Amino acid sequence: MKTRSITAALAAVLAASVASAASAEPVFNRIASFAVADNLPEGKDKATPTSSEIITASEDGNTLVYSDSPNKAIGFIDITDAKAPKAGGSLAFEGEPTSVTIAAGKALVAINTRESFVKPSGILAQVDLASKAIDTTCDLGGQPDSIALNKDKTLAAIAIENERDEEVNDGDIPQMPAGDLVILSLKDGVVDCGSIKHVTLTGLADVAGDDPEPEFVAFNSLDEIALTLQENNYIAIIDGKTGTVKTHFSAGTVNLEGIDTKKDGALKFTGEMKDVAREPDAVKWLDDNRFVVANEGDWKGGARGFTIFDKTGKVLYENGAGLEREIAKIGHYPDARNKKGIEPEGMEAAKFGDDNLFFVLAERASIVGVYKDTGAEPELLQLLPSGIGPEGAVAIPSRNLFVTANETDLVEDGLARSHVMIFERAEGEAAYPQIVSTEKDGELIGFGALSGLAPVKDQAGHLYAVNDSVYAAQPTIFTIDATAKPAKITDALRITRAGAAAQKLDIEGLVPDGEGGFWLASEGDADKLYSHAIIHVNEKGAIEKEIAIPAELRAGEKRFGFEGITSVGEGDDLTLWMAVQREWGDDEKGFVKLVSYKPSSKEWGAVRYPLETTEAGWVGLSEITANGDYAYIIERDNQIGQAAKLKKLYRVSLADLKPGKIGGELPVVKKEEVRDLIPDLKGATNGYVVDKVEGFTIDAAGNGYVVTDNDGVDDSSGETLFFGIGPMNAM
């Protein structure tokens, strides 16, 4: 690869951007990601599932402590250097830690020790941070959920949920025994087990009032406790000093508009739902009179947003579908897990500088919404990418840090691990999102699972993209304005067959036909009745021709088929080239085919492409695009995070693309490495390396662009990375 020097002109541009950043509003950007598996005890299988759920920080902001329910432990992370977090080990318990907080160098850990749902029990363990040893334990008399401390850390409140068994009576409540609230005193961080007060909560809620299900607690500076009773759709305000219930009220319902209501492989934000119970989870005070709740819903409700109340129960602000629609614009809407939409669950609030901020964690969308409290309608400042399933968060304003704990660990599926993500607030520009959608004809353009890129002719910085079978009910060609920052999806062309959305397609690549239409590559999958095919659509997206692969090629057919398509030549000399992702039955191990098809003569052919080797998983191709004298190809392993070793861009000379007859001896092409994409994937947003680098193209000005496939936010962080890699003629 050639090395490019920075020209004087480029240096001037960089200087200008630095000057601009210096005067910009402060933003949060991710500076580090910590894989929770790195904290597993020595000798324990690193493939052991882990989780980071509720997280807190030491008073000096240098140590993070999180609950790891699957391993019945808490974990410690040293963030003295926040950009380089270090494993601090873990401490195991006899039960399941559900929540943790810190006072005076002591971690207070709520632990579920229940024998069964009908015999709940739990303890509060006090752990010395310096020695990582248990000082004392208190019997809580039930199964704890969340824990909170008052401002001066003299009182602790613990929600005793005694959670329902979702396998009994379809999870309907009441299910005894009832939950309550525990309040106890502390002195210099030391808990006084003898001070425990149990606050009775029965008889309050309209829904299953004899079975309160306390979920989350928070103190204001007056030592008043806001407590959510999620399944009861209820909120209570309690005097933390006396244990008296001061006020209590229903969380109420909300009407939602402009939402996607069907789990059908199509993103249509035109639906509505009426009278949806909020069923709040996390709660945080904004001041001594106002608090905000995340409306997760865990039984029958789930209003998809958040609500600001005052202590009397008056609704001061209702977000409705507002956050959800903003999240949809960045490609994080979880259609495959649609019932409760983005599912807001966790929450944090803190003052950074002069700004009172609160953070809403959308579990199913894997996004954190950052809001500025204005005293009236809050202002959405940012959407932060947060790993899979953000459950807990802690703000560390003294260090301008914000940290999320992401509970989902997909190691058993060979996918992403649970991670703790660290963000820093500083002047500059937000690194994420890198691509957003707009509206078309008054409707929000939903997108995700971008699987291929192609250039718009004669328009520098303008591209086409296509989605894959995650959205099988809505195959779409998108138009992207990459000159905007972030890049903008400005149009959506639906692919149709006989006037309806085309079915049984897995579009993995596209190339313009020069006449307003497109050639598309569809990857087959016999289990889904998808065929390996080349498809031609006109300028309206209507399918005009479907070309099945020939019998000679089909003889070795496997699921991992066409992963990209490009064209060489024009008119009768036009040849389409498709990259086959992995070896088929007739391929020598370590070689895959680049397949050719000439529409004018209907001739098929192929060459062999040599694959790299890797220690784990498989290696395959994800894209092919012709430009100038070369065809550029993405080659990658199927690994993620620390296991990812190969995400590279190669090129082969077009002069070497001389196809042989399929079924016969095929020529082998020589490849040349152009760029290792792992540094780009790491540096783009400081997250873990994602698996699916699936799209690459070169625009009309000769600049390269890369996009990743976010799998439609299903078993994925949902992050779509879209970035330029500069002029390709200099590589």
Image: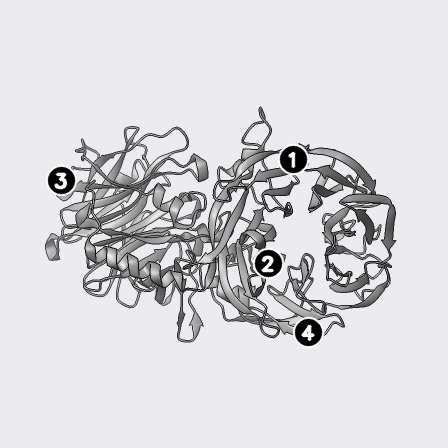
The first of marks 3 and 1 along the sequence is 1
Q: CA distance from mark 4 to mark 2?
A: 20 Å
Q: Where residue 537 sits in the image (x, y, percent)? A: 27, 61
From the image, tell me which residue sits under label 3.
Answer: 658
Say which element carries label 3.
loop
The label nearer to you, 2 versus 1, is 1
Q: CA distance from mark 3 to mark 4?
A: 70 Å
Say which element carries label 4.
strand
Q: Where residue 316 sits in the image (x, y, percent)? A: 66, 74
For image coordinates 20% across by 36% down, the residue present is: 671
Numbered circle sitting on residue 71: 1
Numbered circle sitting on residue 315: 4
Asked if 453 appears above or below 269 in the picture, the reply is above
Dividing the picture into quadrants, the one containing residue 481 is bottom left
Dividing the picture into quadrants, the one containing residue 544 is bottom left
Q: CA distance from mark 4 to mark 1?
A: 40 Å
Callout 4 crowding tier (Cα within 10 Å): few <14, some 14–19, many ≥20 = some
From the image, tell me which residue sits under label 2.
Answer: 343
Callout 3 crowding tier (Cα within 10 Å): few <14, some 14–19, many ≥20 = some
The label nearer to you, 2 versus 3, is 2
